[in-house]
Amino acid sequence: MKKFPQGFFWGASTAAHQVEGANVHNDWWQAEERRCVKVASGAACKHYELYAQDFDLAKQLNHNCHRFSIEWSRIEPQEGNFSLEAIQHYRQVIADLKSKGLEPVVTLHHFTNPAWFSQKGGWTKFNLNKYFLRFVERIVGELAQDVRFWVTINEPLVYSSHAYFLGVWPPQERSLLKTVKVTLNLAETHIKAYRIIHRIYRQQALSRPMVSIAANLQAFEICRANFRNKLAAYLRNKLYNFYFIEKVLRKKTLDYIGVNYYSRNLVDVKSWKLADLLAQTCQDNHFPLPKNSLGWDIYPQGLYKLLLRLKRYGLAVLITENGICTDNDDLRWDYIRQHLEQLHRALAEGIEIWGYIYWSLIDNFEWDKGFTPCFGLVGVDYRNFKRTVRESAVKLAAVIKNNGI
Ligand code: BGC
C-alpha cells in the first residue's frame, strides 16, 4: 500500500454561492435575476440550512478537513452594514466542523462580490479593494481563534478572465485592459490581506496562521513539438500558472501553495497571433483521453508534473481542489485514484504535500454551466434536496481510513 504522511488532510470543498442558496445580495444573483446567465442558482443545495447534515456525511466518509467559502455579501449586504447574524452563522459552521473533527480551510473570496461593491466598479478600481480588506479585517478578527488555514482568493486568474475577458461571468465584460487591472488588483489585495491576517493573529496572540491563494494550475502540453507550440506552452505556463504565485511570493505572502488541478490544455497554435498563442488548443483529437462531462481531458500525470515544477518555491502544497464532473461514478473513482497515485509519486520525490481536498463534497451550481455537471462525492436531488452518497465517496473513505492507496 502506498501510504500518505501522518496527519495528511483529507476532505472536500464547496463555495458559498454554489451550495448555500439564496445569496440575494451578490453580483451573481443580480446577473441571474437579469437573466444574463442561463441558469439561476436559486436555492442551490440549501447548504446554508443543511450544512450540519452535510458535515455529518463528510465525517462518515472519514474526512478530517473541509474547505468552504464565506460569502462577503452575506456578511456585508449593504456597504458598511455588517450582519451579526451572518457572522454568527459562519461561527456555527466552523464550530460544527470542529465538533466533527473536520479542520476548516476558509476561503474569503470565491468569485462572488456584494452587488454594491460591483456597482461601484468592483475589482477594476484599485482603491476599492479597501472594502474587501475591511471585510477581511472584520471576519478574520471574529474567527481567528477557530481557524488556522485561510485561502484569500480562489483562482484569481480564472475570475478575472471569465468576468472581464471571456465575458461569461458577471459583469460579463470583454476588455483586456480590465482583465489586467483586475488581476493586478487581486494580487495587491492578496498581499494586503495576507498581512492583515498575520497581524490579527499576532494581536490575538494566536499561533501563526497559514495563508495562501487557491491557484488554478493547468497542464500545458504540446501535441506537435514545433517551436511555436513550445513557445505558446511556455507563455501559458508563465502567465496562467505561475505569474500570480510568483508575484505574491516576491512579497513573501504565501505560507503554502493552494493548488486546484483539473485537467490539461493541449497546445496547438496555427498562427503567430497573440490570442492564438495564448489560447488556441488542439482540435485534431491527437491523443484522445477520457473526458469529464464538460469535455475536459482526464490527465492525472499533469498534477505530478506541476507539483515537481512547484518544488522550486520551497513551500508546502495543499491540494485545495481536484475533481471530476461525470454521470459515471466509476469514472469518478478512476479519476480520484489516479490523481492520488500521482500525488503519491510527488510525495516520493520529496514534495511536501499537506492534503487532498476533493471538489466537491456535494453536487452544486457550476456557475454559467448550471446544475448539470455533477462534481459531488455526494449527489443532490434538487427537487427535495436529498443527499445520496456515491460509491466513489465510499471508496475514497476507505483510502482515508488506511491513509494509503
Ligand atoms: C472553481 C469551482 C468550480 C470548479 C469546477 C474551480 O475552478 O474553484 O468554483 O466549481 O473549478 O469547475
Image (cartoon, rainbow, N blue to C red):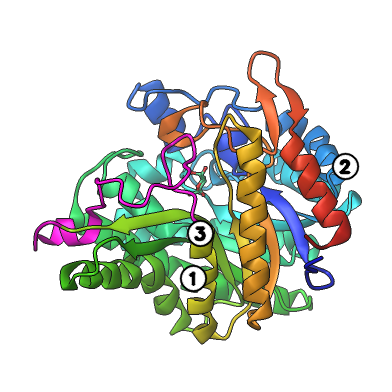
Image spot of residue 83 (x, y percent): 64, 41
Q: How many marks?
A: 3
Q: In which quarter of the image is residue 141?
A: bottom right
Q: Residue at x 28, y 48 (%)?
A: 164
Residue bounds of the magenta highlight: 270-299
> Where does label 1 land, which residue?
306
View extreme (left): residue: 272
For residue 369, side relative to residue 2 (left or right): left
- State the image quarter where residue 33 is shown: top left
Residue under the image location 86 percent in, 45 percent down? 59
Establish if 256 lies above or below 55.
below
- Helix, strand or loop at label 2? It is helix
| Tag 2 residue | 60
Which of 38 and 117 lies nearest the eye of the viewer?
38
Q: Residue at x 19, y 55 (%)?
A: 176
Dot 2 or dot 3, earlier in sequence: 2
Q: Residue visible at 47% across and 28% down?
A: 370
> Is residue 34 inside the magenta stretch?
no
Q: Which residue lies furthest to the right in this view?
A: 99
Q: In this view, does 98 lie to the left or right of 252?
A: right
